[in-house]
Image (spheres, rainbow, N blue to C red):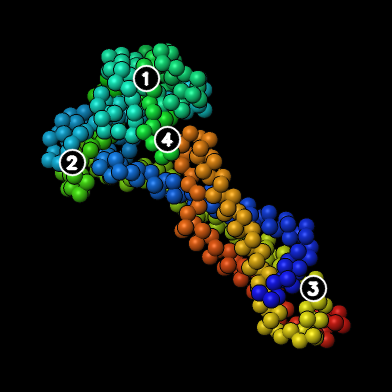
Amino acid sequence: MKYLHLIWAALFRRKLRTFLTLVSIVTAFLLYGLLDAVRVGFDQAGQSANGASRLQTGSKLSFIQTLPISLHQQIARVDGVKDVTYANWFGGAYQDPHNQVFSFAVAPNYLDVYPEMVVTPEARQAFASNRIGALVGEQLATRFKWKVGDQIPLQSTIFPDRSGSLNWKFEIVGLIHAADPKSGGWYSQMFLLNWKYFDDTTPYNQGTAGWYVTRVKDVNQADRVAKAIDALSANSDHETRTLTEQAAMSSWMKQLADIGLIVTSIMGAVFFTLLLLSGNTMMQAVRERTAEIAVLKTIGFSGRSVLAMVLAESVLLLVLGGVIGLGLASVVGPAVSSASGGSLNLPAAGLHSWATGLGLMLLFGLLVGALPALNAMRLSITDALSGRA
């Protein structure tokens, strides 16, 4: 620590270059923090007390393959099942195909299985009695300035009606409130329509369900119940795969994209570029100070001391920029989540992210400082002072 002032002075000898390098390091670790938050957010999907008691049953072949509605009663009779419901993906968009809406055609008892969604008894009654009725998340209603009683057109990007039109009409009969606004933002963005209306109106469903959701009586029996449900359709043309809610969410996302691989690939490219940039900065910084390093050796600094100071300078550069970047990620992530109404879950960088990040900062600092530090240690005093180094 007694040489910290020398290390600090050497680091900021060229302030503009150091500042630009720090900006690059901050950006790299900000991106690392945000992408790691995305990965953690997807890993946490379905992790809740209520989610632990729910199982999702879908086609073993593909998540877009539908299942016969007759499975509903069969699953309900499985020992250990408390409730069972079903839903279909609707694929709605409002006014413009870019205004995608998380829209699902759901069974009458769908809300019974999801206590995270709070709907007034009056709204539930109106939803059950109105064929074209729809329940809309409060954040979604705020986004499009909808209110109860509005009749709105919704375009399905997948299912036409029997006339061949992709335009459907719904009447908003109630709002969905998230029981926990901090972690239930997803539910405030949902659009629920009646499964019966959906099934009767499109010729492409014909009495099938996209997936079933089962609530078990005992969480400890979930694995046995899942196997019993899958046994119902074993060796049939509609074999199923039943998973916990968290595992099902993860499986669905992996069929769309491998989030972990994407995050790792992006960060690999970013950190490789960072190594080249910061390594070049350190090489130039040490090369410019050849005479100064020779003077330090002349007045008694050993080669190892010079080696340690150059490595410390490199590590300090990486740690300073990395800590600022991760700190910004811890602020930006939750701010984005809050601004999205909770539909995006970007948690602040946790202990694991910080530990990994600090490890990377130290590793990169040592890597980029190793070669210039070795050159500085081996520097000949006479060659450096005579201008031959």
- Quadrant where the C terminus lies? bottom right
Indicate which disc residue 206 carries: none
**Residue 207 image-quadrant placement:** top left
The residue tagged 3 is: 289
- Observer able to see residue 196: yes
Residue 167: % across, % down: 43, 17
The tag on residue 181 is 4
Q: Work out how far the residue at label 2 is from the one at label 3, CA to CA, in angstroms.
A: 72 Å
Count neighbours of disc 4 (C-alpha within 10 A) and say few if under 14, some if 14 to 19, many if 20 or more. Answer: some
Q: CA distance from mark 2 to mark 4?
A: 26 Å
Task: Decide which of tag 3 and tag 1 comes sooner along the chain.
Answer: 1
The amino acid sitting under disc 1 is Gly
Question: Could you tell me if residue 198 is visible in this image?
Answer: no
With 238 as the anchor, is 270 left or right in this view?
A: right
User: Rounded to the nearest whole Å, what is the CA distance between mark 4 and mark 1?
Assistant: 18 Å
Q: CA distance from mark 3 to mark 1?
A: 71 Å
Residue 122: x percent and y percent?
A: 31, 17
From the viewer's perspective, is the residue at label 2 or at label 3 nearer? 2
Q: Residue at x 72, y 64 (%)?
A: 281
In primary-sequence order, the first of circles 4 and 1 is 1
* Residue drawn at (20%, 49%) of the image: 220
The spot of residue 242 in percent (x, y) is 24, 43
Residue 61 in the image: state x and y as whole percent.
29, 41
| Residue at figure coordinates x 15%, y 41% from the top left | 80
Q: Amino acid at mark 2?
A: Lys
Q: Say which amino acid is labelled 4.
A: Pro
Classify mark 1: residues with Cα within 10 Å, few (<14), some (14-19) or many (20+): many
For the residues bearing labels 1 and 2, Cβ distance under 8 angstroms:
no
Q: Nearer the viewer, mark 4 or mark 1?
A: 4
Quadrant in which the N terminus appears: bottom right
Instruction: Give the mark, 2 or 4, whose residue is nearer the N terminus.
Output: 4
Which residue, given by chain and number where applicable, does mark 1 sit on? 174
